[in-house]
Image (tube, grey):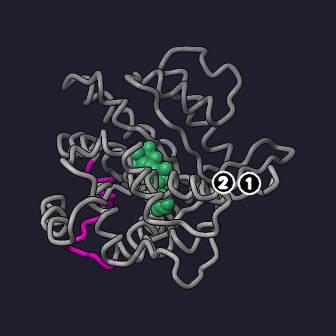
Amino acid sequence: MSEQFLTEKLLQVEAVCVLYPRFADLMEQMETCRKESALANEAMSMLIYGQSGAGKTTLINQYLKNFPRKTTSDGSIVPVFFASLPSKVTIKGCAKTLLKALGAPNASHGDEIDMTSRLVTLIKNCGVELIILDEFQHLLQRASAKGAQQASDWLKELMNKTKVPLVLVGMPECTKLLEAHEQLDRRFIVVEELASFNYVRDASEYRKFLKAVQQALPFPQQDGALHLYDPLCAKRIYVASRGSPGRTMRLIREAAKMAVKKDLAILAETHLATTYTKYIARLSKLPKSPWELSENELDKLVIKVAG
Ligand SMILES: Nc1ncnc2c1ncn2[C@@H]1O[C@H](COP(=O)(O)OP(=O)(O)O)[C@@H](O)[C@H]1O
Ligand SMILES: [Mg+2]
């Protein structure tokens, strides 16, 4: 296999992204906030929360693909504007991050008030219709009650002055900010969790996800090949990953890369088992590999993991 062919296949493995219904639905709700806020008197914002590995950043990147930045003679047009907040950021730091992400010259200059006012102007000038902030919990890390109040006031001010809706994305603790601040909560019409898969509640959702992943991998769909979505295999992957999209994809991607590098035309169960032992076992806290369990033992674990 030529180097270039190998690289292409590895890139194909990395690029797999499945727009499963719950995921696609969140993208649609972001789109609704963008479109309908422009018609409403008040911006309609959204909070998406979920554990690490739930697919939040992937969701944002997938949505952003529909909104490339344009440069015109009058400056940049940025219909959807995205920034990821650094750890323990202050309000001033947040304003600076947003200014930088919008391409402002001298983003660090001035105090909080000055930065916020430049940010509001820039948001208007760039034709921003939606602002997405990832890792939003970082703005709440320092927060005493007073800090949280200030963060809430600042967000309200930003929404009032720009009329642009926010999509805040972060860890589950982000919901606390809305719970504690009613005036802010009112502006967040959608608060949704991007939860892990649950094989007991909806086995078919997980199996359909695995089927879509399999179809996107660089292996021909041939007879006798392993099917990731066969119940036994699906349950093993589910238990190994605890239903986390991140761990599910880590397991499958590493196994697929192993098969690609060996120039094999199929992904086999042994690749998954080896990858589990190498990369996932340490994190999964299972007494035994799911690839060494009987189906009966596996079924019990599925119920336990699903909680
Ligand atoms: N819908 C999806 N299709 C394919 N891979 C996904 C999907 N959702 C998440 N992943 C994978 O899971 C991993 C973790 O996702 P990420 O978006 O970084 O999670 P989070 O931001 O919630 O911590 C990434 O490698 C990503 O490619
Ligand atoms: Mg993320």
Image-quadrant location for residue 223 = bottom right
The C terminus appears in which quarter of the rendering?
bottom left
| Residue type beneath disc 2 | Leu
Q: Is residue 59 above or below residue 228?
A: above
Q: Mark 1 packing: few (<14 Cα in 10 Å), some, or many (20+)?
A: some
Q: Is residue 181 covered in magenta?
A: no
Label pair 2/1, CB-CB below 8 angstroms: yes
Image position of 235 (left or right of 121): left
Q: In this orientation, does residue 282 appear?
A: yes
Q: Is residue 169 visible?
A: no
Q: Is residue 221 left or right of residue 84?
A: right
Q: What is the quadrant of the N terminus in the image?
A: bottom right
- Where residue 31 sits: x, y (%)? 51, 65
Examine the image and state in which quarter residue 269 appears.
bottom left
Give the residue pinned by disc 2: 10
Which residues are the magenta region? 185-204
Q: Nearer the viewer, residue 25 or 72?
A: 25
SS at mark 1 in the image: helix
Q: Residue at x 69, y 58 (%)?
A: 9
Q: Residue, x 59% and y 67% (percent of image)?
A: 217
Q: Residue 76, percent across and down?
A: 75, 44
Question: In the orientation shown, which residue stands out farthest toward the top?
Answer: 110
Q: How many residues crowd mark 2 within 10 Å: few (<14), some (14–19), many (20+)? A: many
- Name the disc covering residue 204, or none: none
Vertical comparison of 135 with 237: above or below: above
Real-space Cα distance between discs 2 and 1? 6 Å
Amino acid beneath label 1: Leu
Label disc, if present, on residue 6 of the rendered structure: 1
Ligand 2 shown in quarter? top left
Farthest residue to the right: give it. Answer: 73
Q: Image height check: is 8 above or below 116?
A: below
Residue 59 is left or right of residue 182, and the answer is right
